[in-house]
Image (cartoon, rainbow, N blue to C red):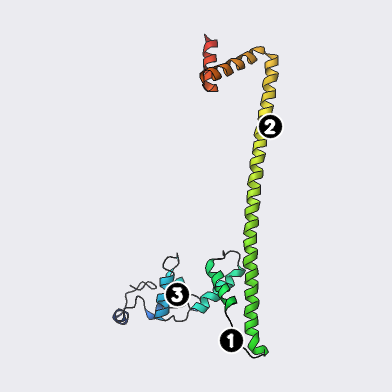
Amino acid sequence: MCPFCNLELGPFELEHGHKWHKACAKCHYCQHEVTHEMAEQCVSKAADNVLSCEQRLYHVPCHERALMEQFKNKEFPIVQEQLDILNRFLLTSHEELPLTLDALYPLLRNLQQAAANVSIAINRKKDKIKIRDVAAWRETTEIREQVNKEEKAKIEAKKIRLQNERADPKLRDRRKAITGLMQAFGISQADAEAMIDKKEAN
């Protein structure tokens, strides 16, 4: 069964041990034929990637050009393969060219694009660092604000409690009794309040 068209393989493919129809092996980018050897390399390389069968097949130059173009699109994350291609291009020694505009222009254009992609990669990294720093700062600020709100709420609750106790001393005696039970028996405030309520009910 051909993985690209889902049709049965023909006698030629079966005889030569091919896993797909020759006509189905087309470059994902330019739609031109990909040799069987190149197709096998592509499929083997992308076996672990979550890609459709068509996306696995490509001519290396087409694939590398597409990855370089993706530097411009912020929707695509920069992947290691892009950096490897860029680095390999920058480290490749180019053959000596005649000092004519026609001969030098393609190389200069490629170098200009490579330099632009380097800048994009560096700035994208900086942006991620900035975003991460801003997120951490925002999280810390939000936590601090929440703590401050809780502290203010506790202070306000204490003020109200003291005002009520001044108005009714029995409330102060009740609070002290609850605190004494918690300290003496190691019980929770709810259990101590339940004991006081039961005593008062009797």
Q: Residue 26: image x %, image y %?
A: 44, 78
Q: Which of these two is toward me, 143 or 76? A: 143
Q: Measure the alpha-carbon separation of dots 2 and 3.
A: 63 Å
SS category of the residue bearing label 3 = loop
Amino acid on which disc 3 is placed:
Leu
Q: Position of residue 78 (x, y in %)?
A: 57, 65
Q: Secondary structure at mark 2?
A: helix
Q: Residue at x 64, y 60 (%)?
A: 127
Mark 2 or 3, nearer chain start:
3
Task: Name the residue tied to disc 3.
Answer: 57
| Residue located beneath label 1 in the image | 95
Q: Single out the mark in the foreground, 1 or 3.
A: 1
Q: Is residue 165 above or below residue 100?
A: above
Q: Quadrant of the N terminus?
A: bottom left
Mark 1: amino acid: Glu
Q: Are marks 1 and 2 in contact (CB under 8 Å)?
A: no
Q: How far across and how far down the image is residue 97, in percent? A: 62, 89
- Taking the spot 65% from the left edge, 61% from the top edge, the residue there is 126
User: From the viewer's perspective, is the residue at label 2 or at label 3 nearer?
Assistant: 2
Q: Residues within 10 Å of mark 1 (few under 14, many from 20)?
A: few
The answer to whether residue 84 is left or right of residue 139 is: left
Residue denoted by label 2:
152
How packed mark 2 is, by other alpha carbons closer than 10 Å (few <14, some 14-19, many 20 or more), is few
The residue at the point 51 percent across, 13 percent down is: 198
The mark found on residue 122 in the picture is: none
The picture places residue 150, in percent across and down from the top left corner, at 65, 33
Give the side of residue 141 with respect to residue 198, left or right.
right
Say which of 40 and 87 sits in front: 87
Give the amino acid type for the residue marked by disc 2 in the picture: Lys
